[in-house]
Structure formats: structure tokens, C-alpha cells
Image: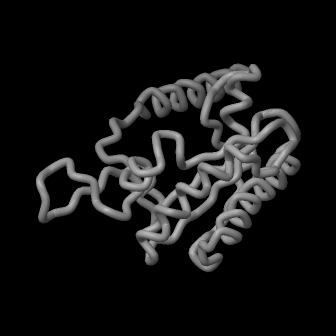
Amino acid sequence: MKTNTIKMAAILLASTALVAGCGKKKVEQLPPAAEGTDYGQTQTDPNAGAGQIVPGSQEDFLQQVGQFGDRILFETDRFNVDAEDQATLQRQAQWLARYPNTRIIVEGHADERGTRDYNLALGERRANSAKNYLTSIGVDASRIETVSYGKERPSALGSDEQAWAQNRRAVTVTVQ
């Protein structure tokens, strides 16, 4: 009995020393952005002055369509494109017409309510609604991909109507 207690104490002491030696490491470099996108990246033209926005980039897109012109919002459990959404998507289509080689991804999102599977399906319907409208006004469907994130990537944190309203969305992201 005494030897078992001594063995357990030795194992506990050794494991404590091992864990104590494992501290947090300082992150020196962040992982790269998702391949093929310039989402969240500031791109500059190497031949231009520092800080200039590259034509056809995500920053150019946001500058031309407005601060929140990259997204359309939806009512609870809905995926229909209303008149306000149509105006936003028309601005996006006009920008895309100026850059015919730029492709986009339309991300579908949902608020935190509902199951994961339900929200993934709803996000897919929202992304497809935006894509369908863009193609109906002349954007080539081969330039548009869709993806659903469901409730996994909220825009606003919180469990109230204000946060939920911001999270029920379809967001357009340029792809290089």
C-alpha cells in the first residue's frame, strides 16, 4: 500500500513538473489568409504610393459599393431578396462589370438560433438567393461561388435582436 502511494506521488510530481514546463508560446506570425481570397487584406499596387487601393481588390469593392455594400440582410427564417437588397446587389453587379476577371464568393450566414444543420441550410439558401439575383441581372454564374457558414461566423456577438439581425446575412467577398 505504501509503495503504491509513493508511486502515485512520484507520477503526480513528474506530471506536474512536465505540465509546468509547458508555457504559452508567443505567436510571432499569424497564419495566412484563406487561399485565393484577399478578404481582410490591404493590397497595394507595388508601382503606386503606399496605401493606395488596388483596383479589383476587396478594398476597392468595399470603397465602391459602400461600407456595408458587401452584404444583404434577411428577416428571421427568410432568404428572399427584397428591394433594398436588390439595390445593394445591383451596385455589386455594376462593380463586377468593371472587373470581368474578378470572381466572388457569396457567404451565407444565420443567427445563433436554430440547430447547426438548419442554419447551414438557411445560410446556403441565402447565398444562393444573392447569387441567383446577381445572375438574373447579368453577372456570369461561373464567376460566383457560394458557401454557407450557418451560425459559425457571427458578425455581431450577443443574444438579442440587434445582434441576430446583423448575423442574418449574405456577404460578397472577392477572390483573386
| Residue at left offset 44%, top offset 77% | 101
In the rendered view of the protein, which quadrant contains the C terminus? Answer: bottom left
- For residue 109, above or below residue 33: above
Q: Is residue 35 visible?
A: no
Percent coordinates x, y for residue 173 in the rendering = 52, 57
**Could you tell me residue 45's position as x and y percent?**
20, 62
Quarter of the figure with residue 89? bottom right
**Residue nearest the viewer, comparing 120 with 5:** 120
Q: Which quarter of the picture shows residue 12?
A: top right
User: With 161 as the anchor, is 58 left or right in this view?
Assistant: left
36 over 122 or under it: above or below: below
Residue 68 higher or lower than 170, as above or below: above
**Residue in the picture at 43% in, 49% down:** 62
Is 36 positioned to the left or the right of 87 in the image? Answer: left
| Percent x, y of residue 99 | 42, 71
Place of residue 114 in the rendered image (x, y in percent of width and height, measured from the top left)? 87, 38
Q: How many marks?
A: 0
Q: Is residue 18 visible?
A: yes
The residue lying toward the viewer, choosing from 89 and 152, is: 89
Quarter containing the N terminus: top right
Instruction: Tell me which residue sits at (45%, 53%) in the image.
Output: 39
62 w.r.t. 48: above or below:
above
